[in-house]
Amino acid sequence: MSNTLTWDQMQDLMWPATWETLQMVGVASVATVILGLPVGLLLVLTDRGGQLENLALNRVVGAVVNIGRSLPFIILIVALASFTKLIAGTSIGWQAATVPLTVGAIPFFARLVETSVREVDPGLVEAVQSMGGSTLTTVRKVLLPEALPALVASAVTTVIALIGFSAMAGVVGGGGLGDLAYRYGYLRFQTTFMWVIVAELVVIVTVLQLIGDRIARRLSHRGGYRSPLGSLFGRSGTPSDDEPVAS
Amino acid sequence: MITTKDLRKVYRSGGREVTALDGVDLHVREGEVYGVVGTSGAGKSTLIRCVNMLERPSSGTVTVDGLDLTALSGSEHRAGRELREARRRIGMVFQHFNLLSSRTVQENVELPLEIIGQDRTTRRRRAAELLDLVGLADKARSYPSQLSGGQKQRVGIARALAGDPKVLLSDEATSALDPETTRSILALLRDLNRQLGLTVLLITHEMDVIKSVCDSAALMRGGRVVEAGALTDLLATEGSQLARDLFPLGDFGSGHPGHTVVEVTFQGDTPAQPFISQLARTYQIDINILGAAVETIAGRMVGRMRVELPGGHQDNVVPIGFLREQGLQVDVLAANGAAA
């Protein structure tokens, strides 16, 4: 019964699935960045010593984020079914998968944003405060621009995690590469096909990581940005801090 | 220009209270360079951060240019609108420069102007002027990571001056720099003080900084100001700790038993008189010079000499009186006749 698929058959299955994955992950990524960024900032600003210090709010948001990160994604899909219908207008297809994907990725991304923003030297915030800058000014002129390389890296990590999550979208008929690998490769013993799909996913992930690293490096003027994968392929110059570089 | 009255700052952490400022009264006159010196932990950093309310004092008042900043609303981490506007007239430079790595030198200098809400053309022109003033016109498009420490601090100074402040606060601005760069940054501060009539309040742990740029100084210890005043007055004050620190003669030895050791300090043109040989001739005594130094402090020449006179203190009342008559300041360090 298990006759191996031909290359043409594989392609006919793969391209629609690739497109589904890209759409699902693309929409979910954009929504995650837009919604997760403020949550991450809120976690930093409301913490002890933060400009909007509010420990009660900080704990509540922190708890919600932790719960969100603990819930298995498969459960999130089921639990959010009616919410999904409300937002996406449907409870099946790749469109329906974007809602639980986004909801699941927001806490993940928010924590990464929090870490990135915390890395910004508090002295820079203080400098802007000493110039008479407001909280909004410090966010716009210091926290976001200074954390930007790290934020880009966080976004890439999130997108890659979303590609992993999207394999489970098959539950709501979302399709995509992960689902294809599961149904054909695993359930129908098409091992070769499964590996072809895995190879495609590896290519997608690697390309995303390389693009992300390149952007992050270009945005970083700190003169020492390195990323583990980037340094395998690209060069990374680290000008010494106290030696002037001739221009 | 800057006045603090009975300034106190108490930190509470885990039930313990640490008093960083314990009733500090400071008075900085318009147009002067005022240095606060002390060891780390003396409270000087807290003091300067209280001046622009980066830290809220627990009690007491801070007045800058006639405006009581402590009366303006805001919390420790978030300032009200009036305080933010007041801060725009107070420039600040930092030990670690605190330049934004995401912006070029020029964009860093423009930042305070963006906050004020000036348009692009005005900002550009002003930034170019300021970079010219600090000698970095050719680095406008560089990023801070491409500059040396001294260059970064010049950018920090240009940025602090962008909003045309009347007061500049300097929080250990030269502590991360090598001696030569320190000198050039201090010379720049001095020039700006003279050219722009800028009032400068600086804190430092280095006496050399006080010596080379300050008109007045305060010595802090344990959250209190133990001594303060114009340097020329301090040097003329007998037993002044600051004067002694400013002008250390080192340990040249405390002389021989049966002798009296005195330190003679002279300022301005008093050294023109050959007082040592006059003293020796008039009183027929042998004078042993243990150590001497001449320095320029607050733009004036100041000299100090440690000499040994034969005999105990009572034998030397008349010669010491003679020296004082010459307009010299005399501190008797030890009368070894009795002690040894």
Image (cartoon, coloured by chain):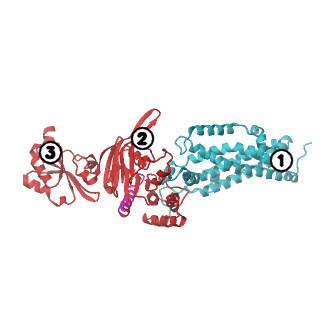
Would residue A235 be seen by someone viewing this image from the given angle? no
Mark 2 lies on a secondary structure that is: loop
Residue B67, image x, y percentages:
40, 52
Q: CA distance from mark 1 to mark 3?
A: 102 Å
Would residue B327 be seen by someone viewing this image from the given angle? yes
Residue bearing the label numbered 2: B58
Residue bearing the label numbered 3: B260
Residue bearing the label numbered 1: A193
Q: Quadrant of residue B151?
A: bottom left
Label 2: chain? Answer: B
Where does the magenta region start and end?
B175-194
Give the label, 1 or 3, closer to the camera: 3
Residue B121, image x, y percentages:
53, 67
Instruction: Tell me the colour chain B is drawn in.
Output: red
Mark 3 lies on a secondary structure that is: strand
Label 1: chain? Answer: A
Residue B262, image x, y percentages:
17, 47
- Say which amino acid is labelled 2: Ser
